[in-house]
Amino acid sequence: MTAHIHTIEMKRGDMLRLNPVHIETAQGEPMNLNGYEVRWQLYFPNGNTPFLVKRSTNHKDVEVVNEEAGTLKITLASEDTADLPHGRYYHEIQVVDSNNQVTTVASGALVLLYKV
């Protein structure tokens, strides 16, 4: 699978919907997500453990819109970032198969801006 790098900017305390998010194989084809769990995770800078995890098992957080096309919708609620300091964080999207094998398919920075 190909790991794409994406930078997201958002105002602290705002709701954010990433839609659509396309997951692809290493050959650039849409990845069939049937049988996979999808996770979106947020880390503090230089952190090794995510402090916020959104999963496809909770359809309001990560919704698989089209399994065969590898299309997702990821939603952050306003309260997910309301109390965080502004600054730069690290995020990633992982797919987990039925054998619990984890593959990171996208990552990048999430920049929290001041809310005016």
Image (cartoon, helix red, strand yellow):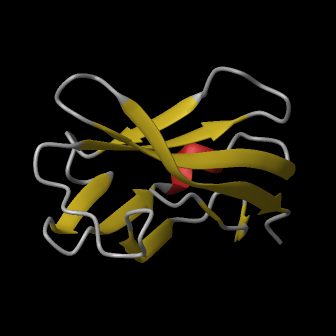
Q: Which residue is drawn at 26% across and 68% down?
A: 70
Of 55 and 75, the residue lying toward us? 55
- Relative vertical location of residue 101 with respect to residue 15 in this rendering, above or below: above
Picture quadrant of residue 101: top left
- Relative vertical location of residue 37 with respect to residue 9 in this rendering, above or below: above
Q: Where is residue 18 in the image (x, y as percent from the top left)?
A: 46, 71
Split into 4 quadrants, where in the image is the C terminus?
A: bottom right
Asked if residue 103 lies left or right of residue 99, the reply is right
Asked if residue 45 lies left or right of residue 82, the reply is right
Picture quadrant of residue 94: top left
Of 103 and 50, the residue lying toward us? 103
- Relative vertical location of residue 103 with respect to residue 86 in this rendering, above or below: above
Q: Where is residue 19 in the image (x, y as percent from the top left)?
A: 39, 77
Asked if residue 85 lies left or right of residue 49, the reply is right
Q: Position of residue 2 (x, y in %)?
A: 51, 61
Q: Residue at x 33, y 68 (%)?
A: 73
Split into 4 quadrants, where in the image is the N terminus?
A: bottom left
Asked if residue 112 lies left or right of residue 27, the reply is right
Q: Which residue is drawn at 83% across and 64% down?
A: 113
Q: How many labels does the image show?
A: 0
